[in-house]
Amino acid sequence: MTSLIQELATQKKIAESYTDAWGKPAEISEESKKLVLKAMGYAVDDPDELAKQVASEEKLKWTTPLEPVYVERIGEGVEASIKIRFRVAKSKSEGKFKYRIQFENATRAPLEGEVTLYDKEPVEKKFIDGEHYFEYELQITVPAILGYHTIELIRNGDSLAKSSLIIAPMQCYKPDAIKNGKKIWGPSIQLYALRSENNWGVGDFGDLANLIEHLSAWGAGFVGLNPIHALYPANPESASPYSPSSRRWLNVAYINVEDVPEYINCSEARNIVASDEFQNELRALRAKEYVDYTGVLKHKLRILRIVFDKAGLHHKSNNTPRSKQFKVFFNEGGDSLQQIAIYDALQQYLYNQGENAWGWPAWEEKFRKYSNPEVMNWAHDHQDDVYFYAYLQFIADEQLAKADWAAKHTGMTLGIYRDLAVGVSEGSAELWANAEMYCPKASVGCPPDVLGPNGQNWGLPPFDPNKLYAAAYKPIIDLYRSNMKWCGALRIDHAMSLLRLWWVPPKESASKGAYIYYNVDDMLGILALESVRHKCLVIGEDLGTVPEIMKKKLPEAGIYSYKIFFFETSKTDGGYISPKDYTAQAMSALTTHDMPTLKGFWHCEDLKLGRRLGVYKTDEIMNKLMTDRLVAKQRILDSLNGHGILPQSVNRNALYCGMSTELNHCMQLHMCLGNCAIFSTQLEDWLEMDKPVNIPGTSTEYPNWRRKLSRNINDIFSNPNLEALARRMTAAREQASGNKQ
């Protein structure tokens, strides 16, 4: 039994060991392997059944001539020799064998060749059910034609098998300006946090376009966004952008209702919005310190439904240009758009029936799978509701495209950069409709480390690497495509997921988990191909423990690293590494959404808040953290002073130095003078705010993903001190790139 478990664990790429957060080797126990395999669906507690499962998979492999997909990465403009392995039964090994590669561009002539087996030595053999099988390796020289092609194996004129052949570049896309040494800055924002005189209580795509136009005039080269993936319109308080319903579609809360063409032409909707009662409610929503998602969505969905019903873009008899645009969008969205639209409509319906419909696991059995006939029947009977939620995606996509256009036409180097979350939540539309691609019983997390002695469980079911491979990576391809649309850069949250993910078995602590490996070269190849096609720079969030192999593979693939000032310290004396010594192929930042603001850090507000919330359990721990913080602040002051950029008005002794505007701006300029191609600032720090966006490890204890900025957009851009800061940051970036003006 143990040997079979071990054999299967190796096949399924479960790690034997790993290097932990303390730099020590850690073994994956047999118990953990069994728990993960059980989550994958293997009968680890029944030796006979497990043996049958393994034998069945082995038979399927050998009786399938071609792999489902071959990914080859090639250099620019050169032919490449690729190796294709295929299998054939001995009884069918005689005769003429040919291969045919049909290129993605169907007008290009296929590449064909013959394969002679009688003089070829098989690379592997297998005897299954009384039949000998041989695996051969075929070497083919292919032209440098990037794309998604088809390879076919033919015997005696009959097709034996077809497979996907993906030819990808070695590196992701880099804009010429950045490739030539230009260094840029821009803010990374939480879109929902933006305040304006016009939004409905949450930042929206109209605010984004406005922000872009102002920031571009001040010299910014990009605006970074939190994940804007689809959440749950019927369950608005499930607001974490990192626990989405679908990573392919958009959060409809960000729609700017008053910029929707159908709203502009709908007098009924405009009259309701113009009423004193409605305007008073909007003013109250805008005035709140934290986003009232329930209130915002109630008003937006009410008005948008009126607009949708009046416009009737989905009606067959409607042949206006707008109707045709919507129908094209709906058809191109395919199954994926129908899935999210039906999910959102059905969830709202169930809530209206008085059910606690937080996610599909809580629904009636007949509705728990997208493929169930009852779901299709319900969708048929509620077509208008389904089309309405598809219409919301149509509008959101249109408005994001408008913001992207603004970024490109105001001359931003990168424009918008989006953030791709590491997974979807357990109650998501993605799991509901595509469970076969996931391991829904497991959850992504991380092993024990300094901050979490028991590890972390993020509640995100992982993609099953074997099923991804069997599907020729189509879910990953679609995911990259949808997220590279309407932006100039994409940040991959937890970029180590390209190599491995820590799977936590069901109902177990994170410490009982194991690393599952993915086909990293295939993943990098597909990422690079989509990056080049979309002209989209890629940033990999590589914080924490990074395996040595990824320290090599990520930069080689042209993926930009992520450097956080507070984490970049010397291993010898603990001092802060100069940003001038950071790698150029990186995005640097002072703070992130998971960290305190500059003011919060300096005044230890994050530690005080953590103590109140029970994150730090004892006074002893708290005192140690406060002492360490004082040491860190002194080292920062020493570093800034050593670089000669600390203003005379700032005290050099951390005991007597509070966070001031001068120190804040000095730290921003310190980063802008650094070597990284990209510097990301935070508007919270510009506004000298002290409350964090998110406190990792908390849920209801703190209003995560709700805190707004303290000032309106127009107030920010009428502030001469902030304009002066932006101009100085732009000049510092030009100085760092060698373009002094």
Image: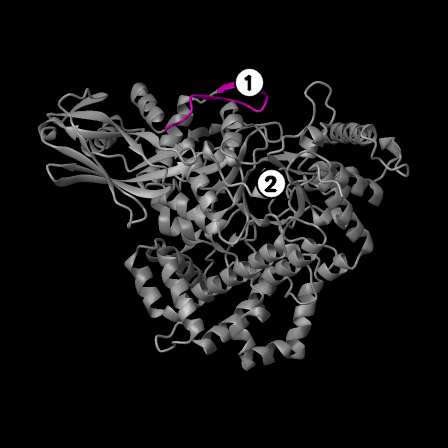
Badge 1: few (under 14), some or many (20 or more) residues near its Cα, within 10 Å? few
Name the residue type under label 2: Ile
Q: Is residue 670 above or below residue 375?
A: above
Q: Which quadrant is the N terminus positioned in? A: top left
- Nearer to the camera, 725 or 372: 725
- Give residue 680's position: percent from left, percent from top: 66, 43
Q: Which residue is mark 1?
A: 24
Residue at figure coordinates x 69%, y 54% from the top left:
215
Characterize the magenta stretch by its predominant secondary structure: loop
- Nearer to the camera, 472 or 33: 472
How much space separates mark 2 and mark 1, taking CA atoms? 38 Å
Q: Secondary structure at mark 2?
A: helix
Name the residue type under label 1: Lys
Residue at figure coordinates x 22%, y 21% from the top left:
124
Which label's residue is closer to the chain start, 2 or 1? 1
Residue at figure coordinates x 50%, y 30% from the top left:
556
The residue segment tinted magenta is 13-26
The image shows a total of numbered marks equal to 2
